[in-house]
Image (cartoon, rainbow, N blue to C red):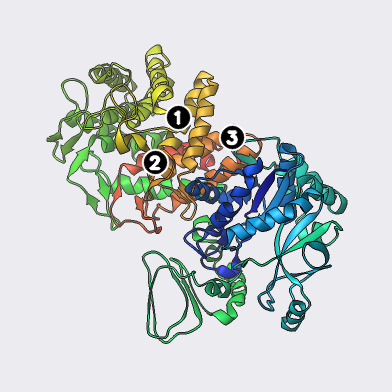
Amino acid sequence: MAIFPVILCGGAGTRLWPASRPARPKQFIDLASDLSLFQETALRTAPLTHGGGRLLVVSGQAHRGFVDDQLAALGLEATILLEPEGRESAPAMAAAAAWIARAAPDGVALFVASDHHIPDAEAFRAAVREALPTAEAGRIVTFGIRPTGPATSYGYIRPEGPGLSPVAAFVEKPDRALAERHVRDGYLWNSGNFMVRASVLLEELEAFAPDVARVARAAAPQDAGRVVLLSDVFRTAPKISIDYAVMEHSRRISVLPVDYHWSDLGAWDSVADGGSGDRGVWIAADGDSGLVRAAEGMVVATAGVTNLAIIAERDAVLVCSLDRAQEVKGLVERLRDISPPHAKGRWEAGGTLAERARYFDSWMRLNALPMWAALGVDEDGGFREAIDLSGRPVGDFRRARVQTRQAYVYAVAGASGWAGPWRSLVSRGLERFEATNRRPDDLYRTRISADGAALDDSASLYDQAFALFAFAAAARAGIAPMMMSERAHALREALAVLRVPAGGWRETGDRPYQANAHMHLLEACMAWEGIEPGREWRAMADEIVALARRAFIDPAGGFLREFFDETWTPAAGEDGRLVEPGHQFEWAWLLTRWGRLRGEAWALEAAIRLYDIGARGVDQARGVAIDALNEDLSVRSDQARLWPQTERLKAALILAETAEGGRRILMVDDARKAMAGLQRYLEPSGLWRDKMRADGGFIDEPAPASSLYHIMVAYEQVRASAGAVPELGGSAEAGS
């Protein structure tokens, strides 16, 4: 009979604050080894599936990224059941049982907590194999830990006899005296882990908690995919634990006494007892003792301290006696009133999608656009490269992409009703660009000095794409439409010199065959197609998409590569293995738009795959998309620049517009998280940070003007989605 281990990822680990918080609960933290408790659990249980079972994980939507990333790091696969809302353990287990019963009617579910520490994995698996025949026979077999002492933080089980026997009673957490008596009388600690045939658990739920069984059957779709979204009906399930729903009523429960070491690591004293919970740099005087965890980049120094827990996270520090570790929960309850973000965890703190959209709208109109219009423009109309955080312009040169991107930004601002001097900014900027950057062959040079002298006369495909894009935005805003069209047509014809025999266009530099420039060229062609619906722009856009389908997107993995050779075969070496999460999102957004224009189902399917792969590059601890993965989707660079956050937001919103059911819930929630991630970079002044380090801090450098294009396109998508995504509140659209 097949075993289906079910890892339950509920619980917040409040007593382990500040390391454990709702944004990153304790199961995803390395409390007892180099692996997280969740990873330890997955490795412990995965070998039990070899008889035809499958690993299942039940998790909330907010923690899907942790589950994905940490399983991928182990090379393990699982079916992930995502709850739209936490409803306690009974509904979660019931949904998993319903899924298993459909997949394998006689399948045995092994329910395990994701946050328990069991160092002897083989002893655990031996106990499971010993209990299996009894579970197959229709009993619920729970694992009772032989106590090592009179603990008051665990519940107890009174067995009817020695060995594997029926349960006589479950006992609540006792006081010290009663705990000592329970240990003398042969009671066992209740580990909360048990195994049962899925069909049997559903029968017991129907007998003792019928509403839970009914909702679970309805919420678990007949879906064999890797990620299964429980339907919205799950929200109506009673909030009840499995102990109250079944264990206290059923007469089919047995207990197997086990001797392996087990701990639920419920508080810092139990982590300290394990002896391997220290992290980071601790400088201690002779005789100092306790548990110290210092976040990356921090140092903890002590002198004359004993029996203390010192937990130093980047935004919060706990110092407590290990003898009073259970009191941390009370501190967190007080903190929820005083500073909710520090209780929840910084990266997921507060803000509905509508609230964040309203802030984004006001920040763009009142802060960013005025700031860059005032400080980011030279007297001759050229746009500056960067502004430092004190408000001083930086850079004595001008890149073509900055000139065209800034012109695009202010053309769109004007079209959206911004009251600033957008028309003058666009007109003067593009005229200056035309005078200083246009070459005799109608292509545009890469870089000039502030006084207009050529510094780099090459014409990159990337820069030509943004010139086309800026001309389209100006024409759409009513700025010299005929002139902009003439410039665009001349540039399109001039691109013939960059043609590649195998299709597409080549880039300048030592990486001439790449997807990135084509992505922006597609964006420009689609913009012009909206203005001039004729054949030329449409054909050019379709050619780029065909090249993406044939070469850029890996046929097996569904992810988008970056660099190629002249035949559009993936480049040799590390270049060919590079996968950028931001570009997965950006292509997902573009292919969704193109697919809607053409009525092409493939494009939407590809977009969803690209989005899901991009999501593998989201660091849940920081709430942001990182810069680079490898082709096996392992992390290549954990730096997180601003621009991938804008692409994540655009893709989540456009896919949410037409998604249905659980997928729609997921996309809307992802859009909220993406907006929260982006807004971490935005300064109230209208400037921004560009590069986030692995520890969540930012590199201290000027704000690059080129990022405003990314922010503006995300802002456009927020406005465009307001009608189709009610969760945006219509705020951004109303703000125009």
Would residue 540 be seen by someone viewing this image from the given angle?
yes
Residue 415 drawn at (x, y percent): 42, 33
Q: List the residue tagged with mark 1.
A: 590
Residue 238 drawn at (x, y percent): 78, 53
Q: Separation of disc 1 and disc 2 at Cα?
A: 23 Å
Residue 554 drawn at (x, y percent): 43, 29
Q: List the residue tagged with mark 3.
A: 724
Q: Residues within 10 Å of mark 1 (few under 14, many from 20)?
A: many
Q: Separation of disc 1 and disc 3 at Cα?
A: 18 Å
Q: List the residue tagged with mark 2.
A: 630
Residue 16 vs residue 150: left or right? left
Q: Residues within 10 Å of mark 2 (few under 14, many from 20)?
A: some
Q: In the image, which is nearer the foreground, mark 3 or mark 2?
A: 2
- Choose between 637 and 599: the one closer to the eye: 637
Q: Separation of disc 3 and disc 2 at Cα?
A: 35 Å
Residue positioned 50% across, 36% down in the render: 611
Q: Residues within 10 Å of mark 3 (few under 14, many from 20)?
A: some
Disc 1 marks a residue whose amino acid type is Leu
Disc 3 marks a residue whose amino acid type is Ala
Disc 2 marks a residue whose amino acid type is Asn
Quarter-wise, where is residue 631 in the image?
Answer: top left
Q: In the image, which is nearer the foreground, mark 1 or mark 2?
A: 2
Residue positioned 67% across, 50% down in the render: 85
- Choose between 132 and 64: the one closer to the eye: 132
First in residue order: circle 3 vs circle 2:
2
Label 3 sits on a secondary structure element that is: loop
Residue 576 drawn at (x, y percent): 33, 34
